[in-house]
Amino acid sequence: MTTDPAPAAAVLREDVTEAIRAAVLEELATVGFARMSIEGIARRAGVGKTAVYRRWKSKLHLVLDLVAAFAVDGLPVPATGSLYGDVRALLEVMSHVLRHPVASAVIPDLLVEAARNPEIADAVRGALLEGQRRMAEGIVSDAVSRGELPVGVDAGRALDLAIGPLSVRQVVVRAAGPAGGGGG
C-alpha cells in the first residue's frame, strides 16, 4: 500500500501579505498601536485572522516588520572620504527615513508604547538602531583610519550626538527638512 506524501507547507501569497501590511498602516493611522487589533487588521485586509498569524505572531511583530522595512539596515555606510561628508550623508539618509509617511506616523506611537512596555522597547531598539549602529561604526572606523578621530571613539555615542537632534526635530517637533535646514 502506498501513501501520498504529506502536503507541502502552505505558500504565503504575496498579495495577501501586502494587503495585510496596507491594512496595518491604515489601522495605525486610524486607531494607533495600543488600540490596533489583529481582528481589525484582518477585517480591513479582507482576510481571516489566521492569514495574519501565519505571517506574524503578534501585532508588535507585524508593526516591527513594517518599521524594519524603513530602517537603514542594508544601506551602505557613507564613504565620502571625510568625516564631515560621511556624517552629512548619514544625516540625509536618516532625515529621509524619518520623513517617510509611514515612519513619521508609526515611530512616535511606537516610542510611546516602548516607554510602557520593555518588550516593545527592546524590539523597537533592535529594529531601529541596529542598522544605524552599523553605519556609525563604519563612519567612525573610517574617520579613525584617516586620522580625523582618535582611536577609542565610542561609535554609539557619536551616533547619538549626530542623529539625536535630527530625531527630536523630525519625530517629536515634526519639523520638515534636514537638521539645521530652516523651518519650524
Image (tube, rainbow, N blue to C red):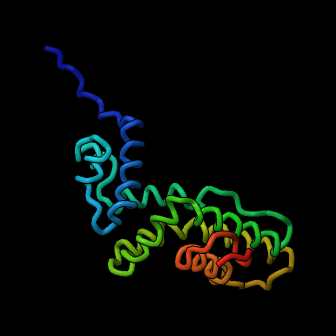
User: Where does the N terminus fall, quadrant-wise?
Assistant: top left
Q: Is residue 156 visible?
A: no
Residue 15 falls in which quadrant of the image?
A: top left
Q: Residue at x 56, y 74 (%)?
A: 174
Q: Residue at x 36, y 46 (%)?
A: 20
Is residue 110 placed above or below 38 in the rendered structure? Answer: below
User: Residue 130 in the image: x percent, y percent?
Assistant: 55, 68
Q: Residue at x 57, y 60 (%)?
A: 100
Q: Residue furthest top?
A: 1
Residue 76 falls in which quadrant of the image?
A: bottom right
User: Residue 43 in the image: x percent, y percent?
Assistant: 25, 47
Residue 178 falls in which quadrant of the image?
A: bottom right
Q: Residue furthest front?
A: 184
Q: Residue furthest left?
A: 1
User: Where does the C terminus fall, quadrant-wise?
Assistant: bottom right
Q: Is residue 157 visible?
A: yes
Comparing 119 with 70, the one in front is: 70
Relative side of 166 to 52, left or right? right
Q: Residue at x 38, y 81 (%)?
A: 115
User: Residue 27 in the image: x percent, y percent?
Assistant: 34, 57
Relative side of 137 to 30, left or right? right
User: Residue 72 in the image: x percent, y percent?
Assistant: 60, 61
The tally of labels here is 0
Comparing 69 with 11, the one in front is: 69
Is residue 18 placed above or below 180 in the rendered structure? Answer: above
